[in-house]
Image (cartoon, grey):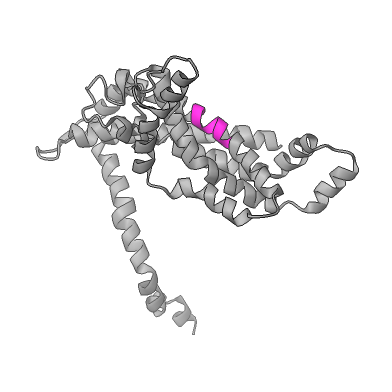
Amino acid sequence: MTGARRNPLRFWPQYVAVSPFFLLFAAFGLFPLAFSAWLAFHRWDGISPVTFAGFDQFRFLVADATFRKAVVNTIIIWIMATVPMLFMSLGLASMLNSVKRFRTLYQVILFLPSVTSIVAVVIFFKAIFDNQVGVVNQVLEAIGLSGVQWLNGYWTIKIVLAVIMTWQWVGYNAIIYYAGLQAISGEVYEAAKLDGAGPLRTFWSITVPLLRPVIIFTVVVSTIGGMQTFAEPQVLFGSNASINPNSGGPGQAGLTMVLYFYQQAFNNNNYGYGAAIAYGVFAIVAVFTLINWRITARAEK
């Protein structure tokens, strides 16, 4: 009886049942991860024989001025998009939590941008912010102001990218905050009301502290997503070569880390350096995620 219990083969039907997941995970998860790590220490253009490069790719990455520019661009765009987005999401969630009618309709409206094709979203906003015939410039000129070269300037390009990211994800985060608000007992708010707390005091003293675990989650997820911005600048400017001075927009103002990785690996066929960039991006995202997590967790204590 003891020998039968120790025999792992007696569970083979269960192993066979769960094996497809692990096989797929090994093929599409573990193998690409291990192969890219190996590739980061080699030079390969996809056709020629692979040659060992040691740490040369990482040394070049540290000295690469274009990669540093991409890092700075990514951080600025992430801050410009994430900070206002999370505050707006919290405000929208509070308003949604207070309405009595059509609540489901509002939830659907808030969720729609996050499931809309990013290509369609970027094309739409590109038309809105067009330098000559965009709606924004038309409105500015109608009220007597000069039009802005939104898709040409260093900061205006970042503003456009931040607006696109905010529009797409503000409703998604609002739904998450709304779910967290639903878990807060109404008795807490009634007690605060009896103590004479106003709406603003109730929001900052009760809602925000009780919602802090959800806020930490959204900050971490937004950090990971924002640091990997790719589709927005790629669709907005559509430049292919990383050596193009307009890659990521004029002056490379919209060149992000992941866009630079994509261009090096798949436009320049420099797969070894592309893998090194990918691990550099991973390290930066991990550091920023840990910093944000520590800041928000310390505030909770």
Q: Is residue 153 visible?
A: yes
* One can see residue 280 in this view: no
User: What percent of the width, then of the height, locates residue 54?
Assistant: 24, 30
The quadrant of the picture occupied by the C terminus is top right
Horizontal placement of 298 versus 119: left or right?
A: right
Q: Main secondary structure of the magenta part?
A: helix
Q: Residue at x 59, y 36 (%)?
A: 88
Horizontally, is 233 left or right of 77 in the view? Answer: left
Whether residue 75 sits left or right of residue 185 in the image: it is left
- Residue at 44 percent across and 50 percent down: it is 115
Query: Relative to the observer, which residue lies in front, 77 or 279?
Result: 77
Residue in view at x 77 percent, y 35 percent: 200
Q: Residue 125 lies in magenta, yes or no?
A: no
Q: Is residue 237 above or below residue 231?
A: above
Q: Which residues are magenta?
A: 79-86
* Above-or-below relation of 250 to 98: above
Q: Position of residue 168 (x, y in %)?
A: 47, 41
- Measured as percent of width and height from the top left, residue 11 is found at 41, 77
Q: How many marks?
A: 0
Q: Quadrant of residue 195?
A: top right
